[in-house]
Amino acid sequence: MGIQRQLTKTPAQITGAAAESRACWWLRWYGWRICARNWIGGGGELDIVASRWRTLLIVEVRLRTTLAMAMASIDEDKITKVMSATQSLIHQHGLERYHLRYDAMGWDEHGRLRWASDIMRINE
């Protein structure tokens, strides 16, 4: 008996994955290289990890009915988990030399995007 993987996705997972795919498209358009999606570690999950030059970008992607709801859904608890996962990623893969940036991409039900860039610096 091993761990069973979920073979079917819920509608919310499907639409969430579509929002993340759109976010990856935008990031690539602006010159970012996608390094990981849905990276799990350190008690949290990183939706998208991207790099460009010496910057490692951590992106939280949210899809809600409105853009305001999407951005507001990133609460303090989520930020704490993302920060913990980020530190785990850095230590596991020796990424201490990178400048880190944390962005949020919110999508509404009409496919509109709000991209909040450089929400907080994790380190300088």
Image (tube, rainbow, N blue to C red):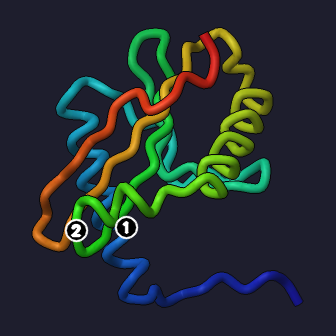
The residue sitting at the right extreme is 1
Q: Position of residue 71 (x, y in %)?
A: 36, 55
Vertical position of residue 56 compared to residue 26: above or below:
above
Q: Residue at x 39, y 82 (%)?
A: 12
Q: Residue at x 22, y 68 (%)?
A: 66
Mark seen at residue 92: none
The residue identified by callout 2 is 66
Left or right, residue 67 beside residue 37: left
Q: Position of residue 72 (x, y in %)?
A: 40, 59
In-front residue for pair 82/97: 82
In-front residue for pair 16/121: 121
Q: Quadrant of the C terminus?
A: top right
- Give the residue type that dot 2 points to: Thr
Q: Earlier in the sequence, mark 1 or mark 2?
A: 1
The residue identified by callout 1 is 17
Counting other residues with Cα less than 10 Å from the Cα at mark 2, is it few (<14), some (14-19), or many (20 or more)?
Answer: some
In-front residue for pair 107/40: 107
Q: Position of residue 92 (x, y in %)?
A: 78, 32
Vertical position of residue 8 compared to residue 77: above or below:
below
Q: Residue at x 39, y 44 (%)?
A: 104
- Residues under labels 1 and 2: Cα distance? 18 Å
Left or right, residue 41 beside residue 15: right
Dividing the picture into quarters, in which one does residue 99 lie? top right
Q: Residue at x 18, y 52 (%)?
A: 113
Kindly check if marks 1 and 2 are in contact, taking CB atoms under 8 A apart as contact: no
